Amino acid sequence: MHAALVGVPYSGKTTMFAALSGIEPGAKEELVGVIKVPDARVDCLRSVFNPARTKYAEFVLHDFGAGGGRNETIPARVKNLIERMEMLVFVVRDFESAFSGDPRDPAAEYARLREEIILADFMTVEKRLEREAKERRNPPEIPVLKKIRARLEANEIPAVEELTGQELGQVSSYNLLTLKKRVAIVNKPEGETGIPPALSEMLAREKVPGFDVSGSLERELNDIAPAERRAFLESYGLRGTARDRLLAAAYETSGLISFLTVGPDEVRAWPIRSGMTAVEAAGKIHKDIARGFIRAETVPFDVFKKHGSEEACKEANAYRLVGKDYVVRDGDIMEFRFNV
Ligand SMILES: Nc1nc2c(ncn2[C@@H]2O[C@H](COP(=O)(O)OP(=O)(O)OP(=O)(O)O)[C@@H](O)[C@H]2O)c(=O)[nH]1
Ligand SMILES: [Mg+2]
């Protein structure tokens, strides 16, 4: 999963990048941080299998800097870059800033970002439809684009649930910003918490998960020994880090789950969309495994843990044989049988 921090200048994107990724950035404009998604199931399986490699799911965070003019909400250069992301993480400022000319108004800032992605997509869609009106080639995505344009014209974010998987596929090459998953982070001063009601209402209306963080405070965690971080956060009344909350929000809003693979070579978590079948999950590992799929053996992690080992699971008949259409569940340990 690739996500970009998006916000107006001085909202604290780079501060948040450092806080969330644990990486202290240098002067580079464009920052990439790989966050390993903590997973107690992987920790446990690692202790059982003692594998050569352990791989956690990864969440890749990008900060594309500001660039462009100071008055632009999202500069064109950044817009081109965030098009390639799967998720937008909006950062809105809720602290007094000596740099920004704007007042402290996180709801207004969020509204600006929201308008900006609506406008950007409207222009993309409108341009395409205008060209189509001249060319009259009638490609299959035209009705979908019209549906989307109607939403955007009404200043609404098109609801992904209203489009079928096929329709989404037809417009996927347009990389529309409003069809991406969104999460909002409210950047608070140290010691303050809470999302202002005007903003929470906006977020709730469009089902965008949001949470409040003091970016500069959480960034200080980078200078604190890991063992002391929890006590530091608790002294500010905080439970869990900004990173944990971002990952939880991101997984929830994208409907992501993980299945697991185990063995002496590797214990690994594989993030997939909830609802994927065994053969689709196999394809995440390798196309050949999906192509030559015969069946899979699976056991839920909790059941595995209860028995404690592969041998004990086999003795207890805990493994299930499943076919291509089996819907994979969060925490399933999967072993695929295939022909190449
Ligand atoms: N008081 C306070 N200041 C903050 C906080 N987060 C960031 N700042 C300050 O606000 C300024 C801008 O922060 P950045 O993290 O550089 O903001 P940015 O969004 O990356 O800015 P550009 O990349 O220039 O658009 C810096 O001086 C930060 O120290 C915060 O939570 N509280
Ligand atoms: Mg920055």
Image (tube, grey):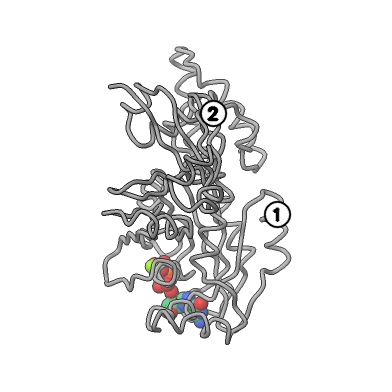
Q: Can residue 206 be spotted in the picture?
A: yes
Q: Position of residue 338 (x, y in %)?
A: 35, 25
Q: Dot 1: what SS?
A: helix
Q: Nearer the viewer, residue 211 or 275?
A: 275
Q: How many marks?
A: 2
Q: Is residue 240 left or right of residue 161?
A: left
Q: For the residue marked with disc 2, what is the amino acid?
A: Tyr
Q: Is the CB–ligand 1 distance for label 1 below 8 Å?
A: no
> Which of pointers 2 and 1 lies earlier in the amino acid sequence?
1
Q: Name the residue at 45% across, 62% down.
A: 71
Point out the image quarter for the C terminus. top left
Q: Dot 2: what SS?
A: loop
Residue assigned mark 2: 326
Cα distance, mark 2 to mark 1?
A: 34 Å
Q: Position of residue 273 (x, y in %)?
A: 51, 39
Q: Judge depth for marks 2 and 1 and give the one in front.
A: 2
Residue assigned mark 1: 204
Q: Name the residue at 38% across, 49% down.
A: 268
Q: Can residue 68 be spotted in the picture?
A: no
